[in-house]
Image (cartoon, rainbow, N blue to C red):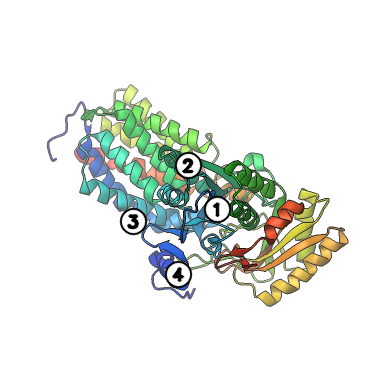
Amino acid sequence: MKMLINVAENVVADALRGFAAAHPELTVDIERRVIVRRGAPYEGKVGLVSGGGSGHEPLHGGFVGKGMLDAACPGEVFTSPVPDQMVRAAAAVDSGAGVLFIVKNYTGDVLNFQMAAELAEDEGVQVVSVLVDDDVAVTDSLYTAGRRGTGATLFVEKIAGAAAEEGAPLDRVAALARQVNSASRSFGVALSACSTPAKGGPTFDLPDGELELGVGIHGEPGRERRAMMTSGEIADVTVEAVVSDLNPDGPVLVLVNGMGATPLLELYGFNAEVQRALAERRIPVARTLVGNYVTSLDMAGASVTICQVDEELLRLWDAPVSTPGLRWGC
Amino acid sequence: MNATPDPEAPVDAAFLRRWLDTAASVMEREASRLTELDSPIGDADHGTNMRRGFLAARTAVEQEPPQTPGGVLVLVGRTLISTVGGASGPLYGTLLRRAGKDLGEEQAVPAARLRDGLRAGVDGVAALGGAVPGDKTMLDALLPALDALTGALDAGGGAADALAAAAAAADEGAKATIPLRARKGRASYLGERSIGHQDPGATSSALLIAALADTAREDG
């Protein structure tokens, strides 16, 4: 598999060097792997810290900036960051108002953030952690590590970030983050496996003519494989999966997210089918975002996330944001 | 550091430093196999992460060699937590840190005392990860290893023989994860499709116990 890299061991460090060069408005500690909003900590503002394995760009580093995250901790490819990174990030963004950890529900992320929270509190930083677990493809949560955190992470980071920017206290920011998570559901589809730099090739076999339903964002196979379907058929399966689980009775935010290797042309076409499928179910759409936001390296495919919003959540969604990956109203 | 080990208390700092050298070499040698095992049911990074962690641990111990066996294990555990990431970092870090803390300040201990320390570490892993035997995790290698170690020591076996029995049980335990369905960690998302694959974490656990057995055999 050809990749635009030097050596596999250095892909994360190389990407951080390039990210730093492209975004002088952020402080990038390449050695210690922490990306911090310049000027942090902001007086009286709750600090938002997230992180996770690399390979999902622009998540999380691309969402550091005004109105979203204060710091992000990139791990190795598909590997959670280590506690030292989050402890350093928490110290860098804490103004005394406390720090919110936004953690995707994967065993590695949960364990490392848990250790980091304990260490940060030893250093006098008040930390509250919120888990994101929106992936409905994981059905029997009792016998698994629980639902995975995927597309809803973007909604949580944006809405909690807007509330923190307005000066909301830590308990309020955490409550909003939890509300967004519990109002969100996602489902992903892969048309191809992804290739990690360490392995140098696809992490699972997905033959031509087949797709993988309910796929995760780490190259882990999904739960069911079917013969290839049209965009409209995929939208029907995907929308049914999220809607039947959430049962929204009000307007929703929609994220049609590319996995990394699917062209925007196809994603917009897919979005048309997603909107059609939602309309058939009489679900009003408040806002829609289409693009590559929570990716899985070079996987082809897409995921759909919906989040039911009230007026307050919608207002916070519309609030100004200025980050490398998401920017409006500024 | 090359003093003849006390046959009654063969596990000292030098013993565990030799174990660490062996373990780091094994992780280097087996990294691609561990990553290969991690591909169909995980995310293809276990070997890379373990190699990075154990090489860093070897460097840390070389730079400031702890003088007690407990000190070696605590430093290795701390370094793994800081360098491995994923679930393996906190889990292996906790295993060795707890074991080291349990050994305390003792200068040299018998194999039975090492076994007690490892048991404390394994309890820590179970508490942190929430897994039980049969969940297709590292516990499926570690728990049979502890049982075999206890059985061999109770039967009057020496450290080298007891650790060899532990290594064999760990290896068997790792192989016995093949027909199991994963209930913890990333492999659990696959449900039935996790069946038929050997668990990478159980495999790396068995390699670490085998490194202990090799160290004891070379001493013998």
- Earlier residue among tags 2 and 4: 4
Q: Which residue is mark 2?
A: A117
Please state if B17 lies on the left or on the right of A209 as rendered. Answer: left
Element marked by disc 3: helix
Residue at the location (51% across, 61% down)? A61
Left or right of A239? Residue A25 is left
Which residue is label 1 attached to? B41
Marker disc for residue A24: 4
Tag 2, which chain?
A: A
Identify the residue position indicated by label 3 in the image.
Answer: B29
Q: Are marks 2 and 4 in contact (CB under 8 Å)?
A: no
Mark 4 residue type: Pro
Q: From the viewer's side, name the closer residue of B44 and B74.
A: B74
Question: Do the residues marked 3 and 4 share a common chain?
Answer: no
Q: Amino acid at mark 3?
A: Arg
Q: Sort mark 3 into few (<14), some (14-19) or many (20+) by Cα contacts within 10 Å.
A: few
Counting from the top left corner in percent of width and height, residue B128 is at: 49, 36
- Residue situated in front as seen by the camera: B33 or A262: A262
Q: Position of residue A259 (x, y in %)?
A: 62, 66
Mark 2 to mark 4: distance in Å? 29 Å
* Disc 1 + disc 3, Cβ < 8 Å: no
Q: State how far apart marks 2 and 1 are (Cα).
A: 29 Å
Q: Nearer the viewer, mark 2 or mark 1?
A: 2
Distance between the alpha carbons at the discs numbered 3 and 4: 41 Å
Residue A191: percent from left, percent from top? 65, 68
